[in-house]
Image (tube, rainbow, N blue to C red):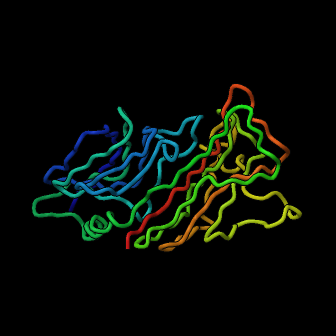
Amino acid sequence: MAKKLILDKIFDVGTTYRCEEDKYYVIRKVGTNSTSKATLYIDGHPVLDIIDKIAPLAQVSGNRNSLLDLGELYLVVPRNKTLNFTGSSGSQMRLVGELYILGAGESESPEHLSRFKAQTTNYFTYLAASISKAAGTVIPAGTEENVLTWEAPIDESWTFDGLYMAEGMSDTTNVPQMYSRIYIEESPLDLLQTAMGKKGISGLSAPYPPRDAVNAVPFSLKDMPLEILPGKSLRVTYVNTGGDYTVPTGTTFNFYVLLVGKRKIL
């Protein structure tokens, strides 16, 4: 019977690793310090996209996100198969899960081999976008502008049921009056009139990333999954829910949006 050990290793960008003839990995959680998109490849195929804002190598005061839990979309590196990732220069990726050591005549479990075959067409990735305004720019009360506009490819379906980050900042300082609104097929998942309340989701509720200085608790779409079918659209805007806002001298206003998604290639 295969021997199961703890996997908790840090891998370097640009290096190709290969499992030994009697060993294989099952990856359950991931993190990185890559400040640009980090793509994990197994056997030469992309199986995961991540960035430090989603899941750092370790939870710290400036980013309270934990390692990304892959759940049913866990990853498998079978015997003799390669593992590598691309990302920002000098970056690392932390992989947590199980290391299996096989006995004579043993092979990977059927369940793990099945997931290995499926992981190139059903895996975690993300969408991210931002908009900037220079110092002195006036953003009038009630302004609403697109930050992210996206349409699912005709041969893909996406599910967003986890981390959602959408926050307006003057440099690194939160601007509380800036909220985000989500649209699917141009239908807002929100109020239509302000008589019922402010439009959108507060940036204090969906910090980018969750951190001690603003809000250490991440915002999740778990209870309101967004299902984006092939050819359907997703749009996220920012809206100024307060009075006229002038970007302070010597700073830049940025509104950031990031959604973690499960991509399924049909």
Instruction: Tell me what residue is drawn at x 41 percent, y 49 percent.
Output: 30
Point out the residue furthest to the top here.
250
Nearest to the observer: residue 93 or residue 227: 227
Point out the residue furthest to the right here.
195
Determine whether 50 is above or below 72 in the image: above
Quarter of the image with the C terminus in it: bottom left
Residue 205 relative to residue 156: left or right: right
Residue 258 relative to residue 240: left or right: left
Instruction: Name the spot of residue 64 as percent of width and height, x first.
Output: 58, 42
| Total numbered labels | 0
Residue 242 relative to residue 162: left or right: right
Determine whether 135 is above or below 208 in the image: above
Instruction: Tell me what residue is drawn at x 63 percent, y 41 percent.
Output: 132
Quarter of the image with the N terminus in it: bottom left
Instruction: Name the spot of residue 212 as percent of width and height, x first.
Output: 66, 37
Nearest to the observer: residue 210 or residue 241: 241
Nearest to the observer: residue 110 or residue 226: 226
Residue 137 appears in which quarter of the rendering?
A: top right
Instruction: Name the spot of residue 148 as percent of width and height, x first.
Output: 58, 55
Point out the residue furthest to the left here.
104
Instruction: Tell me what residue is drawn at x 64 percent, y 55 percent.
Output: 146
Instruction: Name the spot of residue 166 as percent of width and height, x first.
Output: 64, 50
